[in-house]
Image (cartoon, rainbow, N blue to C red):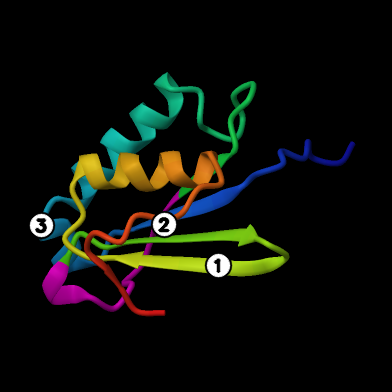
Amino acid sequence: MPPKFFPTRGHLLVCQGQNCQARGSVLLSKALWNHLERASLAYYKQGGTLRLTESGCLGACSYGPTLCVYRHRGGELEEGWYAAVDFPLAAKVAQAVHEEAELPEDRKYGP
């Protein structure tokens, strides 16, 4: 039997590199995961659309915790990179992805 497919609107990655962990990325990831579950935003919840993954280094080691988001929007892949992420910003990014709204500009860097 093939695995069940869960459609998603976006994928959030929280860096777990050594420098980001020293700046709280482990707690950020856990808090964001709990938020996605409680708000039914997690991809496996009814109406949920988001995936969350702990990642390796995202390249902003002096500015962590770092969050990256990928989503398809307007037929193209959109990405957002965020530095010095706290829980309120992470929750705001997650909500924007779920609602297919513009990504927040606060602490955004990169492409």
The C terminus, quarter of image: bottom left
Please tell me which of labels 1 and 2 falls first in the chain. Answer: 2
* Residue 107 in the image: above or below residue 28: below
**What segment is highlighted magenta in the picture?**
53-63
Q: Which residue is mark 1?
A: 78
In the picture of the structure, the residue carrying the numbered disc 2 is 13
In contact (CB < 8 Å): disc 1 and disc 2: no
Residue at 63% from the left image edge and 59% from the top image edge: 73
Identify the mark nearer the N-term, 3 or 1: 3
Residue 68 vs 101, above or below: the answer is below
Residue 71 in the image: x percent, y percent?
58, 58
Amino acid type of the residue that numbered disc 2 sits on in the rendered structure:
Leu
Q: Amino acid at mark 3?
A: Arg
Q: CA distance from mark 3 to mark 1?
A: 27 Å
Q: Nearer the viewer, residue 14 or 107?
A: 107
On the picture, is 51 further left or further right than 2? Answer: left
Is residue 105 visible in the rendered image? The answer is: yes
Tell me how far mark 2 sits from mark 3, CA to CA: 16 Å
> Residue 63: x and y, percent?
14, 70
